[in-house]
Amino acid sequence: MNNDTGKQTISVGQLAILFVSFMIGSSIVYIPNPMIQFAGNMAWLSLIASTLMGIILLSLALYLFRCYPDAPYPEYLNQIFGRWISSVFAILLMLMLYLMLSYIVLGIGNFFVNTMMVETPMYVFNGLTIITAAYTVHAGIEVMGRMFFLLVSSMLAFVILIDFMAAPIARIETLLPLFADGMKPVLHGIYFSFGFPFAELFLFSALFPFVRKESRPSVGKWMYAMTAISGFFLLTVVLVTIMTLGPLAGDRKFSLYSVARLIQIGQFISGIEAVVGIALIAGSFMKATIVLFILNQATSKFFKLQDDKTVLPAIAFVAFLLSVTMFQKESEFSYSVNDVWPMITFTVGVGPMVLAAIITFMKRWISARKQARKS
Amino acid sequence: MAEKIAVMVFVGIFLFALIIRRIKRLHRRERWILLLYVIPIGYLSLMYATNRDWPNLHDLANLSIGELANIIVGWLKKQP
């Protein structure tokens, strides 16, 4: 449905679907293994803490949405910080999004090359992902919202299926001992899991203005519910991974895929990891599409382009080239994602948003006090 | 190298096919903005085709914010 200005709009339910696909999409494949490496058996506690921190960040994003309902992030930074500072934030945001998009695309290629299709060159997966994502973005956010409902449903259905089917081989004793190495591993897990994916939810401030005006009052409760659901799904995956893989949990890449490989029921249900792998990668594809959409919107607004699809192919092509040139070794990619990426989201994303919320609150409070004195 | 060039041409054709009809209707300013992208695309294409390890976007991130990240992660990894 388009509004009067021809801009595509989505319902709050479609926003929720996009949000879940964004939060869980690539996280469900890539989060468990590093989290368990960092936090050990206490990875579940790190995830709970990160989810709560994500909810606090979401409250700031929603507050700014209520204050600036028709201006997407980072456009409203213009009104808060002024033109020059907001331009610096916008440029940093765009660079961050290029990194994010190329990391997601590279992650998809990495997954296929390491698991199912080891002989196929990675550029095949990177190229196909970016082309499909670009065409999906070109179709518009409405198409994305409708299409992702099926993909998200299948992804979550498979996750639930694996969790249930892994129950017979799960061992609760592998969750012990608690706090074996103190608090630092838990904090390390929080540093990683908040940076990826919970801190990234600030990007959804760019999509809130696409929600139809009549649905906007319920955006808050849907977003809080979806954040909690995302946290819950990630938590179940981490718990199942620890309980099934035990001491190997931190060593096995693509933990959920590894768990799926262990599942065998009778003589007739086995080898379901291939189907699961496809469902999981659909999640990464959805996240890549949403990031590309946000990057395209941010770039178009920054350059004040009349047609917001003008630079889409160029952006996608740059992201593809970044994904095939950035890393010579997998360890470099792991370092960039596990250690550096959380700090990037804190400084480029969370920092400006927190500052914007504080300044907006102060301005409104001072303005309200002045009006109270006058009256 | 020929394989990599073929990959880039293939991906480029599929992507730019999205706006092939719009290019004629673009204003001069929009064409210049699109042309700006020739710089990073050219640089990255050359890097990819020749398999060189030139400075890239993640190097910018690692050298700037990465230092702070190293300090924090180093402290988190240190055993009490």
Image (cartoon, rainbow, N blue to C red):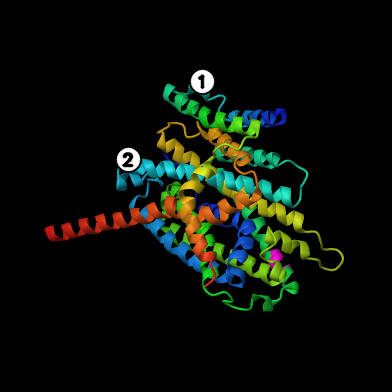
What is the CA distance from the residue labelled 1 to the residue labelled 2? 33 Å
What is the crowding at mark 1: few (fewer than 14 residues within 10 Å), some, or many (at least 20)? few
Confirm whether residue A71 shows in the render.
yes
Determine the residue located farthest toward the right in the rendered image: A267
Residue drawn at x 44%, y 47% is: A206
Dot 2: chain letter: A
Q: Position of residue B4 (x, y in %)?
A: 68, 31
Q: Which residues are magenta?
A: A161-165
Q: Quadrant of residue A26?
A: bottom right
Quadrant holding the C terminus of chain A: bottom left
The three-letter amino acid code for the residue at tag 2 is Trp
Query: How many numbered discs sit on the rendered protein?
Result: 2
Name the residue tied to disc 1: B24
* Residue A126 to residue A249: above or below: above
Q: Secondary structure at mark 2?
A: helix
Closer to the camera: disc 1 or disc 2? 2
Q: Quick one: B13 or A88, which is closer to the camera?
A: A88
- Asked if the stretch drawn in magenta spans residue B9, the answer is no
Name the residue tied to disc 2: A84
Residue drawn at x 60%, y 33% is: B47
Residue drawn at x 52%, y 41% is: B57
Q: Position of residue A282 (x, y in %)?
A: 65, 50
- Asked if the stretch drawn in magenta spans residue A163, the answer is yes
- Co-location on one chain, circles 1 and 2: no
Q: Which mark is residue A287?
A: none
